Image (spheres, grey):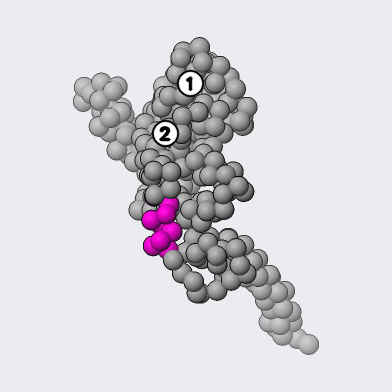
C-alpha cells in the first residue's frame, strides 16, 4: 500500500465514526429535550378521561379549547391573576434589574475607585450563593420592614442579580471603547449624559442578554414567593400551579388545568427568546473578537 493510499483511506474510518457519534449524541439530546415538550402539548389538549388513560400520545380525544376555558374559570379565574402577577414580576423586574446590573458592571469596568477588585470579588462570590440560602434572611428583613405578603417582598429582591453585574462588566469591556468615552468628555458631556446617550446605546445587545437571563430567572422563581406570600391573589404562576397540583390528589379535576396552565406558562419565555434572539446571539459574542 502506498503512502497516498494510506493517507486517503485510514483517516476516513475514524472520521466517519466520530461524525456518527456526534450525530447520535445530537439526536439523543434533541429527543431528550423535545419528547417532554411533545407530551406536555398532547396532554394539555386531552380531556380528563383521556388524560388518565394510556392514549395520551395518540392524536385523538382533543379538547384544548375546553381545557383553556376550564383553566381560566377555575377558582373564579385565579389563573389569569397569577399570570398577570408573573408578567408584572418578570417583565418589570427584568427590565429594571437589567438596567441596574448593566450600570453596575459599567461602573466596575470604566471607573477606578478603592477596593474595586475586592468588591467585584464579592460580586463573583455572590454568584455562587444559591437563592434558597438567601430566602430566610430576605424573609427576616422583609418582616422587619413590614412588607411580608406584599408585592414588594417578591419584587425588590429580584432587582439585584450578581451574575447580571458580572455580565454587565464583560459587555462593557467588549462594546464600549475608552476612546469613545474620552471623546464624549472632551465635547463637554457629563458622566451621566455619556452613559445614557453613548454607552447605553452600545450596550444594547448586552442589556437584552441580561434581560433575558433575568426574565427567565424571575419567571421561574418559586421558593422566594412561597416563603414571602400567603395571599393567593399575589401568587405567580409557578407557585399557583404548585398549589393546584397539591390539590389534584384530592380533586382530580385540577390535573387538566395544571397541565394546560404549565403549557401556557412557557409561552412568554419562548416568545421573548424568539423576538430578542438577534440581540441575544450578538450579546453572547461580546469581547470574543478584538
Q: Which residue is mark 2?
A: 233
Q: Can you give x and y, in whole percent of width and height, for residue 1 in the image? A: 78, 87
Q: Which residue does the image show at 58% across and 31% down from the upper left?
A: 131
Q: Left or right: 94 with respect to 12?
A: left
Helix, strand or loop at mark 1:
loop
Q: Earlier in the sequence, mark 2 or mark 1?
A: 1
Quarter residue 10 falls in: bottom right
- Depth order, front residue of 125/271: 271
Q: Can you give x and y, in whole percent of width and height, for residue 110 in the image? A: 41, 26
Query: Does the magenta-highlighted stretch encompass residue 2?
Result: no
Q: Which is closer to the viewer, label 2 or label 1?
A: 2
Q: Which residue is mark 1?
A: 148
Q: Residue furthest front?
A: 251
Which SS type dominates the magenta stretch? Answer: helix
Q: Can you give x and y, in whole percent of width and height, for residue 147 in the image? A: 45, 18
Please provide the residue range marked out in magenta.
Answer: 64-72
Amino acid at each position: 500500500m502506498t503512502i497516498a493510499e494510506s493517507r486517503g483511506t485510514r483517516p476516513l474510518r475514524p472520521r466517519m465514526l466520530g461524525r456518527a457519534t456526534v450525530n447520535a449524541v445530537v439526536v439523543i439530546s434533541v429527543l431528550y429535550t423535545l419528547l417532554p415538550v411533545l407530551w406536555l402539548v398532547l396532554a394539555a389538549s386531552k380531556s380528563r378521561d383521556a388524560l388518565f388513560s394510556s392514549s395520551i400520545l395518540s392524536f385523538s380525544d382533543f379538547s384544548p379549547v375546553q381545557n383553556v376555558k376550564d383553566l381560566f374559570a377555575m377558582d373564579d379565574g385565579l389563573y389569569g391573576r397569577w399570570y398577570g402577577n408573573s408578567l408584572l414580576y418578570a417583565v418589570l423586574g427584568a427590565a429594571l434589574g437589567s438596567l441596574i446590573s448593566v450600570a453596575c458592571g459599567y461602573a466596575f469596568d470604566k471607573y477606578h475607585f478603592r477596593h474595586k477588585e475586592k468588591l467585584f470579588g464579592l460580586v463573583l462570590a455572590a454568584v455562587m450563593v444559591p437563592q434558597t440560602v438567601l430566602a430566610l434572611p430576605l424573609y427576616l428583613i422583609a418582616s422587619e420592614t413590614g412588607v411580608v405578603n406584599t408585592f414588594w417582598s417578591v419584587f425588590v429582591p429580584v432587582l439585584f442579580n450578581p451574575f447580571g453585574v458580572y455580565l454587565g462588566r464583560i459587555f462593557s469591556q467588549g462594546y464600549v471603547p475608552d476612546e469613545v468615552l474620552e471623546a464624549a468628555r472632551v465635547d463637554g458631556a457629563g458622566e451621566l449624559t455619556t452613559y445614557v446617550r453613548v454607552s447605553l446605546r452600545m450596550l444594547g445587545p448586552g442589556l437584552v442578554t441580561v434581560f433575558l437571563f433575568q426574565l427567565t430567572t424571575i419567571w421561574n422563581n418559586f421558593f422566594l414567593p412561597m416563603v414571602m406570600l400567603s395571599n393567593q391573589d399575589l401568587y405567580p404562576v409557578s407557585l399557583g400551579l404548585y398549589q393546584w397540583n397539591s390539590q389534584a390528589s384530592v380533586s382530580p379535576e385540577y390535573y387538566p388545568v395544571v397541565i394546560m396552565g404549565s403549557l401556557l406558562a412557557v409561552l412568554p419565555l419562548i416568545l421573548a427568546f424568539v423576538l430578542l434572539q438577534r440581540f441575544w446571539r450578538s450579546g453572547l459574542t461580546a469581547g470574543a473578537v478584538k
